[in-house]
Image (cartoon, coloured by chain):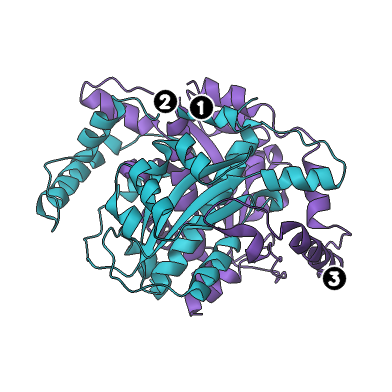
Chain colours: A cyan, B purple
Amino acid sequence: MNDVIQLLQSHRSIRKFTDQGIEQSVVEELIKAGQSAATSSFIQACTVIQVAKGERRDRLAELANNQAYVADAPVFLVFCADMHRHKVACEQHDAEMLSGFTEQFLTASVDVALFAQNVVVAAESLGLGICYIGALRNKIDAVADLLELPELVYPVFGLCLGYPAQDPEVKPRLPVSVVLKQEHYNEEGNSESLVGYDAHVNAYYRSRSETQKDLTWTGQIAGMLQKEARPHMLKFLKEKGFLLR
Amino acid sequence: MNDVIQLLQSHRSIRKFTDQGIEQSVVEELIKAGQSAATSSFIQACTVIQVAKGERRDRLAELANNQAYVADAPVFLVFCADMHRHKVACEQHDAEMLSGFTEQFLTASVDVALFAQNVVVAAESLGLGICYIGALRNKIDAVADLLELPELVYPVFGLCLGYPAQDPEVKPRLPVSVVLKQEHYNEEGNSESLVGYDAHVNAYYRSRSETQKDLTWTGQIAGMLQKEARPHMLKFLKEKGFLLR
């Protein structure tokens, strides 16, 4: 195992940051690393909006379930799936863009995620800590308004960046045998492996340094999935021109 | 700029591989690196199916637009978004899972992409080359049947892995000024920047070592987006239990 793999396997989200800022030239280097990720048919469908500390950032934090680290992180980026840029390119060539396909929503969203994960790896290689903010989708219409997003652009998630002021434990992941299968989908050995994994996760939650809980993985999942999952998303995305066909 | 960022910024897809195989212990190390990526609410919604060279792999290559490298790559992985595992966890706890939300489709797909990109970075750090295979979605229902995917599981993309037998140029990405915006979405300076970028991309396509073309970025995008984008996707995904609400 080399240093890069060691770095990847050491990831944990950071939610407390020191006051130390990040040079803008470093942010741009991270963005270039993000852009270097593979992109489906070269669409390059990611636009990043950097929001400085201040009123707009505070409002984003409020909209994202009042997570203080959204307001406090030295750098906050909103990763948007952007096919508006493609509409402009089509117009420039007098081409009629066929939009609204589910496939386009998927490729643009995947593009954004590949880009963001490269930004994260680059950031962590510099000793920075990160936290993805999916809660930007709690009030996604208000976030889109605040960031003045046009049709065919939507915010996929946010990202907090800064130097860590905490050192949390790495959260144990599913056994490889559950996640990697040979030749075809199968559940062989899964139920046995999950018993052991539940115990492992429970030990982690009970003993970790911050906010101890008494939870297992399957218990946590079962609790979560009995609730509706951001039921406003489909309507919002359709209004933005996605998932129409 | 450190070695990790250098590695990220040097990515290019590899479509020709040497015969050298990859040890299974290395594949598992890559999977662990993938699992270490952030996962939305700890859902860990990625299942990877590794398909050995042989009949099934040949059939996948056929279904993916007859790309020879899908059949030939030493290792081929299919990255699936998997919420079937969560249904099992719910049943185990006598909980009724509310599925079909667009939000769940999005978080599962993003989970898969973050996971895969970590696998890619880990692989490239070992000198391996990779190529994402979105064309697995060309005949996605046949791929899903071949891999015996149950409800709530779909193949997001494939990934070829192997030692490179070619050394293609890095493809130029959009100017950072087009991709990174401050405070809110805006198109300031984009049209000027895209003129220069189109020239840059054209020079790349005309001079690269393999398959020269006379294309610009906006021209390529305009050409592509006049066509339907895998119009079967929405129906397929709904049949698998996704995007129902």
Q: Are marks 1 and 2 in contact (CB under 8 Å)?
A: yes
The answer to whether residue A150 is left or right of residue A233 is right
Q: What kind of element bears circle 2?
A: loop
Instruction: Tell me, yes or no, whether dots 3 and 1 are on the same chain.
Output: no
Residue B190, given in percent of the width and then of the height, sits at 72, 58
Q: Report crowding for label 2: few under 14, some 14 to 19, many 20 or more residues within 10 A (C-alpha).
A: some
Tell me the number on the disc at residue A234.
1
Say if residue A69 shows up in the picture.
yes
Please name the residue shown 39% across and 36% down the image. Answer: A138
Q: Quadrant of residue B84?
A: top left
Tell me the number on the disc at residue A231.
2
Instruction: Tell me, yes or no, whether dots 1 and 2 are on the same chain.
Output: yes
Q: Report crowding for label 3: few under 14, some 14 to 19, many 20 or more residues within 10 A (C-alpha).
A: some
Q: Nearer the viewer, residue A140 or A3?
A: A140
Q: Amino acid at mark 2?
A: Pro
Q: Residue at label 3?
A: B207
The answer to whether residue B233 is left or right of residue A157 is right
In three-dimensional space, the C-alpha distance between marks 1 and 2, rounded to whole angstroms, equals 7 Å
Above or below residue B23? Residue A46 is: above
Q: What kind of element bears circle 1?
A: helix
Quadrant location of the C terminus of chain A?
A: top right
Q: Nearer the viewer, residue B84 or A81?
A: A81
State which chain disc 2 sits on. Answer: A
**Between tags 2 and 3, which lies in front?**
2
Please name the residue shown 43% across and 42% down the image. Answer: B47
Q: Report crowding for label 1: few under 14, some 14 to 19, many 20 or more residues within 10 A (C-alpha).
A: some
